[in-house]
Image: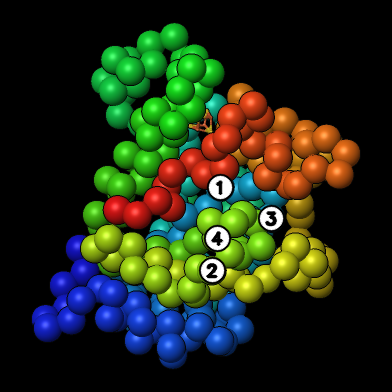
Amino acid sequence: MLDIPGRTVRALATDLDARYGNLAPEDVLDGVIHCFGDRIALVSSFGADSIALLHLVAEVKRDIPVLFLETGMHFEETLRYRDDVAKRLGLTNVIDLEPVFIELSREDPAGDLHISDPDACCSLRKVRPLNEALKNYDAWITGRRRHQTFARSTMAVVEPDGPRIKVNPIASWEQSDVDAYIDAHALPRHPLVAEGFPSIGCAVCTVRPGAGGDARDGRWKGFTKTECGIHFSR
Ligand code: SF4
């Protein structure tokens, strides 16, 4: 937990956002990674666009902790891609976060909770494991972008997140910026992008969006849910 005598996390976030909020992503990352040292981690889904931020971060610190929510529900392609990308970028500290076995047995013995209550399933497999892991850090980095959902449209580059700081270095990027970065650095795409998946999460909750659909339409089809919950206020 971040402990700053005489300061609130909110005040620190405001200061950091004033300092870094208008800088290029690589400068934001350089600043916050050096500011927080071993107390900052990146959270990555190794999804459709993740490699852009993973590459940006690897350019600054290859042994930064990269937290991956291993829900047990991923596409095989995602798990292989995670390993391939880590090797290619030289990321040496990718950490799988798994749900607690006894909670899994008690709350989702048949493995079908995602059908009846996806919020409870995300809480069990994502939110709680991440909250537990984040106790080891004062700040975390995400790849969220403002254009992705209405809820994200006004987020700051640096924001308070309960007892810690959350950093969104590519908040201002449009999809075209991500695509241009990936192309410019000749980075490999998640293999399912070529098969029509613009947004990739757990296999059981990801479909190809229909023609003309938004990228996030392929997630939690049939539910109003647009976020897994890891970014809700703590
Ligand atoms: S995305 Fe689906 S399967 Fe994955 S944790 Fe959330 S509800 Fe469960």
Residue at 75% x, 47% y: name it: 214
Query: CB under 8 Å between callouts 2 and 4?
Result: yes
Alpha-carbon span between mark 3 and mark 2: 21 Å
Please tell me whether mark 1 sits on a helix, a strand or a loop. Answer: loop
Asked if ligand 1 lies within 8 A of label 3, the reply is: no
Identify the residue under disc 2: 154
Residue at 40% x, 66% y: name it: 166
Residue 203 located left or right of residue 19: right
Alpha-carbon span between mark 1 and mark 4: 17 Å
The image's mark for residue 45 is 1
Asked if ligand 1 lies within 8 A of label 4, the reply is: no
**Given the current orientation, which residue lies at the most extreme bottom position?**
19
Query: CB under 8 Å between callouts 2 and 1?
Result: no
Which amino acid lies under the numbered mark 2 shown in the image of this protein? Thr
Which amino acid lies under the numbered mark 3 shown in the image of this protein? Asp
x then y, percent, for residue 227? 52, 44
Identify the residue under disc 4: 152
Alpha-carbon span between mark 4 and mark 3: 17 Å
Residue at 68% x, 45% y: name it: 216
Q: Foreground residue, 73 or 220?
A: 220
The image's mark for residue 226 is none
Asked whether residue 167 appears in the rendered view, the answer is yes
Q: Residues within 10 Å of mark 2 (few under 14, many from 20)?
A: few
Please tell me whether mark 4 sits on a helix, a strand or a loop. Answer: helix
Which amino acid lies under the numbered mark 4 shown in the image of this protein? Arg
Asked if ligand 1 lies within 8 A of label 2, the reply is: no
**Quadrant assignment, res 178:** bottom right
The image's mark for residue 49 is 3
Residue at 34% x, 77% y: name it: 13
Label whose residue precedes the other's in the sequence (4 or 3): 3
Residue 88's place in the image compared with 133, above or below, is below
